[in-house]
Amino acid sequence: MTHEVFNRLRDAYTTGVTKPLAWRRGQLNALRRMITENKQAIIDAVAADLGKPASETLLMEIDLVLSEANFVRRRMRWWSARHPKPMHWLLQPAVGWTINEPKGVVLVISPWNYPLLLSLEPMVDAIAAGNAVCLKPSELSPHISHLTAELIERYMDTSAIAVVEGGPEETTDLLAEPFDHIFYTGGGRVGRIVMKAASENLTPVTLELGGKSPCFVDGTVSLAAAARRIAWGKFTNA
């Protein structure tokens, strides 16, 4: 199944489906509509998986994805335009420029702890760049994983955007495919597995690995204000 999904995405990218700015804008608009029209279902799914309250899902997941989609949508034309670059005098009268091109077919592997944000935010950026995207949500948050797959099937262009659900076996199968970029969020142990598998195809990788967040408090601060802020950060998403 994963091989068939990859081939479908590769075919879509190769035929140029994802390249036009109109397609990219259309998909970002569809994604924003998908989230806006299904906010309560998303809140309920995240609560079923993690017990996360509605206000936190809105603030730390839904609003951040919508904000990212709005941010990149306004800047896509500038980012994808030609940008003139000066040429060395020995090369005159030559002219030069740079232009940003999509990478191709991108794999996004997301974790369970921010199941919507860390699935859809990287996908937003990959779509804005003109890539075909395969999303692998975490099997440890099954309700939001199923809902995300269902909504993307309903709202997005499934010739170029796909969701593969499952566990380690499906992830291993996906990593065997020659993706053009892999974005992984999670821990170091699985990160090493992702990077090792990617090296077989010389696939570039973005690893967003979890870790500690130390905080230093010195004598110049308001202790009451610092304590409130540290406690807020400590218990966010807990």
Image (tube, rainbow, N blue to C red):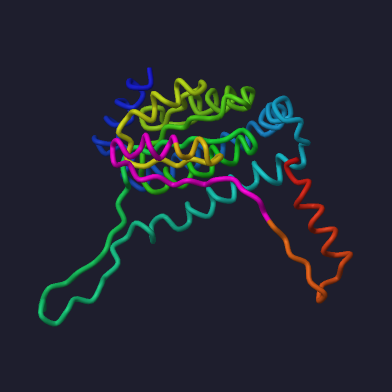
> In the shown orientation, is residue 65 left or right of residue 3?
right
Residue range of the region highlighted in magenta in the rendering: 193-213
> In the shown orientation, is residue 46 left or right of residue 159?
right
Q: Residue at x 35, y 37 (%)?
A: 198
Q: Which residue is drawn at 48% across and 56% down?
A: 74
Query: Is residue 203 on the magenta stretch?
Result: yes
Q: Position of residue 26 (x, y in %)?
A: 44, 41
Residue nearest the observer in this picture, 98 or 196: 196
| Total numbered badges shown on the rendered structure | 0
The quadrant of the picture occupied by the N terminus is top left
Image quadrant assignment for residue 183: top left
Residue nearest the observer in this picture, 42 or 187: 187
> In the shown orientation, is residue 204 left or right of residue 40?
left
Residue nearest the observer in this picture, 145 or 36: 145
| Residue 99 position (above or below residue 106) | below
Q: Where is residue 148 in the image (x, y as percent from the top left)?
A: 56, 28
Q: Which residue is drawn at 46% across and 37% down?
A: 108
Q: Where is residue 236 in the image (x, y as percent from the top left)?
A: 75, 46
Q: Residue at x 61, y 48 (%)?
A: 211
Which residue is farthest right? 224
Q: Where is residue 25 in the image (x, y as percent from the top left)?
A: 43, 45
| Residue 72 position (above or below residue 106) | below
The quadrant of the picture occupied by the C terminus is top right
Which residue is farthest bottom? 89
Image quadrant assignment for residue 220: bottom right
Query: Is residue 42 on the magenta stretch?
Result: no
